[in-house]
Image (cartoon, rainbow, N blue to C red):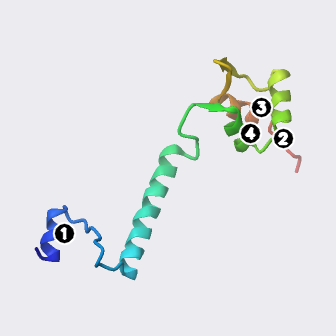
Amino acid sequence: MSARDQKQKLGGHTQLFGEQLVTLKDLHNFKNELLLEVKKSLKENAGQPAKKWLKTAEVRKLLGVSITTLLTLRINGTLPYTKMGGCLYFDYEDIVKVMERLKFQHPH
């Protein structure tokens, strides 16, 4: 079977076999396709996490705070949470609301 026949059989996609080489053009095409997919994904999610409920470690990473700071925000009621089965969950929308409420406006 010729390379062209193999490509048509695979629906226009090429498949690498042990004796084939990846060309610079192949890598360039792959890079462009990957970048388009990443851009599309970012636009769809608008920078938001893919899920609504975040665990403690995810919230700490998102906000860039220590476990103690997150504990303080939780205890003083600044950041609402839900506890289920020993795990704490934070609603992404609540985090955004708190950030908006606490946003500083500097005078000009």
Determine the residue positioned at 53% across, 39% down.
50
Q: Quick one: SS at disc 2?
A: loop
- Earlier sequence position, callout 2 versus callout 4: 4
Residue 60: mark = 4
> Label 3, on which residue?
101
Comparing labels 2 and 4, the label whose residue is closer to the camera: 4
What type is the residue that disc 2 sits on?
A: Phe
Whether residue 36 sits left or right of residue 78 in the image: it is left
Pick whichever of labels 4 and 1 is earlier in the sequence. Answer: 1
State which tag comes first along the sequence, 3 or 1: 1
Label whose residue precedes the other's in the sequence (4 or 3): 4
Mark 4 residue crowding within 10 angstroms, few (<14) / some (14–19) / many (20+): some
Identity, as a three-letter code, of the amino acid under mark 3: Arg
Kindly give the residue lying farthest to the right in the view shown: 107
- Residue at the image point whose x is 37% and y is 80% from the top: 25
Residue receiving disc 2? 104
On screen, residue 35 above or below 41? below
Tell me how far mark 2 sits from mark 3, CA to CA.
9 Å
